Amino acid sequence: MPKITTRQYDAQAFYTLSQCGMSPVLARIYAARGIESSEQLETELARLIPFNQLKNIGLMAELLADAIAAKKRLLIVADYDSDGATACAVGMRVLRRLGAIVDYLVPNRFEYGYGLTPEIVELAYATKQPDILITVDNGIASVDGVLTANQLGMQVLVTDHHLPGDELPDATAIINPNQPDCPFPSKSIAGVGVIFYLMMALRAELRQRGAFTENNKEPNLASFLDLVALGTVADVVKLDSNNRILVQQGLQRIRKGRACAGINALLQIARRDYQQVSTYEMGFMLGPRLNAAGRLDDMSLGIECLITDDVAYATQIAQQLDALNRQRREIESTMQESALLKLTEMLETQDTIITASYSVCLFDQEWHQGVIGILASRIKDKYHRPVIIFAPGNENEIKGSGRSIPGFHLRDALDLVAKRHPELILKFGGHAAAAGLTIHAENFAAFCDAFEQAAQTLLTPADLTRVIETDGDLEASEINMQLAEKLTQQVWGQGFPQPTFKARFYVENQRIVGEKHLKLKLKKIACGDEGNNQQSDTIYDAILFFHNDPLPDIIDAVYRLQINEFNGRTTLQFLLDHWSHSDN
């Protein structure tokens, strides 16, 4: 059973925000997220961290400006997820606008795997014959790939945001806020944010060289922030203040109808109103459709959707991406059933049951490489354990995708396994919350044991209990459309969570809608009022998704405020994230 807690907040920050005219509930919410002044919530572009704080960005801008002047051939090597696709699209669109000769190549995950491998370098050399390779959302771990490129006479410019290993590649220049001695304070910027910053530096370098004239006007880079926002949200990076500015500015452009043809087409195919778009649509509607190309087919399809200005062509590709996403969901559903069956068998046949383990590792010969990350996330959510799911890779190899829980840095854990057992992991990389790796198939059992040992080293028993953080209870007077609208206007996401609240309710009415959801009528119970009818008389609409079993008469619930629009009518609704039987 999850542990439900109330976020703590700094009293001085609460007081400062309240003095600025902020309502007590909003001041409490923001103070609990580390906001100490109203200025930290401002999202003007002028508040972005200056690009010159990124190590090597001036050098890379000079190299690109020289390359454009010399008509050298540039090739962007992208990653096959939403961050990589949007980063590639930003690079392609801006570099073309600046007069560069530029093309792109995205590795097929099933043939070449992740990053700038020697094989993808050789393919680039044979088919594109570039002078310069530019990595986006990858490259920081591509020591061998960069060496191959250097041997073939190609320069490599690495733009990445992933954590570096012990050895950096011998690239001509590297931009990565997480590389040693980089002072850029936003360590959580996505790959698309890094290439956007490089384009700002390149524009400044070209401006200094007098490249812009009446006939060759300076581009407005803000017009590409829709792509930056999508990649940032879809990659689930921490939404620090700098990332919130990038996302908010991108959302504003989309809401004003200024998005690129591809984003508009994806919104249309998902049946979402561009004027009401939020981080939810970015993360759960557009991101998965874009990712489906890289998971099941070729991310070139997603990139083409984002770089075309042809509305009809973008719509055609969006339809293909939507079909791939439906196929992905079917594969994922089958794999999840299989994985849960394996877990059930483990519970029945092994002395060490899953609830006593600190980690989960699963492999099936029939599982699909492109969906194992999503499956790992589902299993992690169900059991609150770090999870790595493996699928067949190249000959005698299996590829794993992992998802982690708070308190367990997944990449560091894999690094610990690699140091303790140098023979086990062929390659790995990633973040605190997500990582990937490749091992020999015959080493699966040994890896499971080694990973479990690492988990027991780095986790405590308390870490294995899921904690649901809320922003506490709301007074009846605080529950209104005005608060819901205020919350809707803010950018929420990883590291800056959307506010949730907890309360006890009478379930006045419940009915199934859409065959799998519960539509509820709830009456809020004030603490200590059970049985004496002194609870609020206000009845609230609520929805509990993907649950069609009847609820008890009294529940404890964690909920979000939601503005529900139906048949042209706008109402306040509770979206239930969690419920349990009342203690009383």
Image (spheres, rainbow, N blue to C red):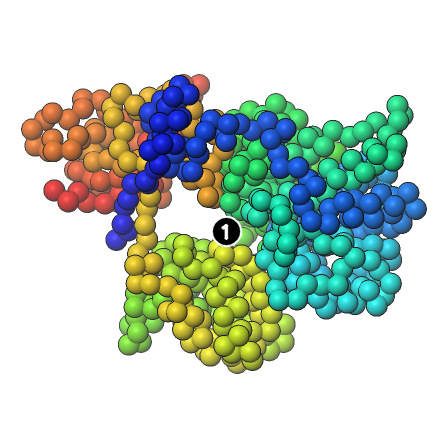
- The 10 Å Cα crowd at callout 1, few under 14, some 14 to 19, many 20 or more, is some
Residue 579: image quadrant is top left
Name the side, left or right, on which 407 lies relative to 305. left
Residue 500 vs residue 350, the one in the foreground: 500
Q: Which type of secondary structure does the marked residue at label 1 adopt?
A: helix
User: Is residue 119 positioned above or below 12 on the image?
Assistant: below
Residue sitting at x 52%, y 40%: 240
Q: Position of residue 109 (x, y in %)?
A: 65, 61
Is any part of residue 242 visible from this angle?
A: yes
Residue 551: image quadrant is top left
Instruction: Kindly give the residue lying farthest to the right in the view shown.
Output: 70
Residue 355 vs residue 520, the one in the foreground: 355
Residue 158: image quadrant is bottom right
Name the side, left or right, on which 104 lies relative to 263. right
Residue sitting at x 82%, y 64%: 150
Q: Position of residue 239 (x, y in %)?
A: 51, 41
Quadrant for the C terminus in the image: top left
User: Is residue 408 positioned above or below 573 on the image?
Assistant: below
Residue sitting at x 65%, y 63%: 141
What amino acid is found at the position of numbered circle 1 in the picture?
Arg
Name the side, left or right, on which 386 lies relative to 580. right
Residue 541 vs residue 38, the one in the foreground: 38
According to the image, label 1 marks what residue?
Answer: 329
Q: Position of residue 469 (x, y in %)?
A: 33, 43
User: Is residue 443 positioned above or below 265 on the image?
Assistant: below
